[in-house]
Amino acid sequence: TLAAAKVDEIMDAAEDIGATTMKAGQGLEKNAKEAARKVACEEGGAVYNLLKRIDAVIGGNGYAVGDSLTIADLYLYTGSCNLVSGLYDGVPVDTLDGFENIMQLRRAVRSHAEVCKWYDSMDDQSKLPASYSKLI
């Protein structure tokens, strides 16, 4: 179906977030790699352009496809949380701030009752980055 194809498209794009970020500065020393990743996240950069396309495709209803939670939402949520978690050296923590649809999706996923239940069930030894916290 068309919805299933769109789910696949979003999941592929979400996977590309990590690959595109890793490619920026690949093989460079720490400071140069961090600078290259920062540039990639700025307007016109490879990461920025990918996020811009994703933001346009998902629209603004809080979900990537349709009006309920799908695996595409979870993929995009985790990919975007990882992006700004500190996992990738040089990526500013505010990289996603200008992408309203992605931010709306992140808020919708993290406030979804079943997602909250899952995170609440994690033991205290699980150390999640702050980017996985509930969003206001």
Image (cartoon, rainbow, N blue to C red):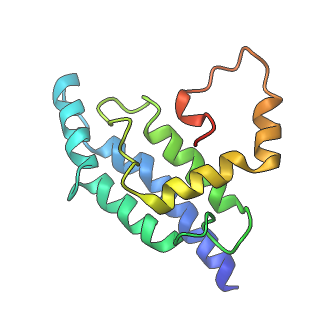
Looking at the image, is 79 positioned above or below residue 100?
Answer: above
Q: Locate residue 23 relative to residue 122 in the image: left or right.
A: left
Q: Quadrant of the C terminus?
A: top right
Residue farthest to the bottom, as pictured: 1
The residue lying toward the viewer, choosing from 127 and 98, is 98
Q: Position of residue 83 (x, y in %)?
A: 44, 41
Q: Quadrant of the N terminus?
A: bottom right
The residue lying toward the viewer, choosing from 132 and 78, is 132
**Labels in figure, total:** 0
The residue lying toward the viewer, choosing from 32 and 44, is 44
Residue farthest to the top, as pictured: 125
Q: Position of residue 18 (x, y in %)?
A: 43, 46
**Residue at image coords 30%, 61%:** 49
**Residue at image coords 30%, 45%:** 23
Q: Position of residue 88 (x, y in %)?
A: 38, 33
**Residue at image coords 58%, 57%:** 105
Q: Locate residue 120 relative to residue 64 in the image: left or right.
A: right
The residue lying toward the viewer, choosing from 96 and 11, is 96
**Residue at image coords 79%, 31%:** 120
Quarter-wise, where is residue 128 in the image?
top right
Q: Locate residue 31 relative to residue 107 in the image: left or right.
A: left
